[in-house]
Amino acid sequence: MRQFYAVFLMMLASVGPALAEEQGPIGIAFVEAPEQGGGVCTGRDPETAFACAREKCVAESGAAEEDCLSRTWCFPAGWSVDVFVQHEEGPHWHEVLCGLDSRETAMAVAADLCDKGRRPYLMECAAAQLYDPDGNTVEVTP
């Protein structure tokens, strides 16, 4: 019986670290092909997450892989917000912030970025996409 417990404990000890790795925090990667599209993926490391996001960018935008640029990585992912911003002269871009502690914080950050008092040159500015800590798209509501 002692041999059984010894073998059982050794097996349990070897499985524990593997389970801990699978349960640990994830990061989030944002890739963008300017004026064309982008991709977002989560992962345990930036290389894996960026590769996944780049694949999504190519598929979504039809752009070449080299046009899909790595933009932002946060670890742990936290809440993320993608803010669409357009200058009054026409150029537009996205500002992505991640690693935030809550949905409310993400929306407050977006509102602050879009404050016309601080950025009077903006023609348009709004939260375009919101992501939860698992990288799922969440409805953007004020």
Image: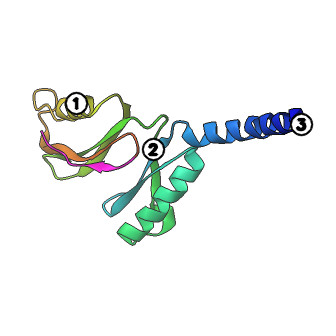
Could you tell me how far apart the alpha carbons at marks 3 and 1 are, in whole angstroms? 54 Å
> Which residue is situated farthest in the bottom direction here?
62
What residue appears at the point 32 percent right and 64 percent down from the top-left corner? 36
Please give the residue where the numbered disc 2 appears in the rendered image. Answer: 28
Please give the residue where the numbered disc 1 appears in the rendered image. Answer: 104
Could you tell me how far apart the alpha carbons at marks 2 and 3 are, in whole angstroms? 45 Å
Question: Is residue 108 located in the magenta-colored stretch of the structure?
Answer: no
What residue appears at the point 26 percent right and 34 percent down from the top-left corner? 103
Classify 10 Å Cα crowding around label 1: few (below 14), some (14-19), many (20 and above): few
**Residue 54 horizontal/vertical position (percent):** 48, 59
Figure quadrant of the N terminus: top right
Q: Which residues are magenta?
A: 135-142
Residue 20 quadrant: top right
Mark found first going from the N terminus, 3 or 1 = 3
What residue type is disc 1 on? Glu
What residue type is disc 3 on? Gln
- Secondary structure mainly formed by the magenta segment: loop
Mark found first going from the N terminus, 2 or 1 = 2
The answer to whether any part of residue 32 appears in the image is: no
What residue type is disc 2 on? Ile
Figure quadrant of the C terminus: top left
Residue 77 quadrant: top left
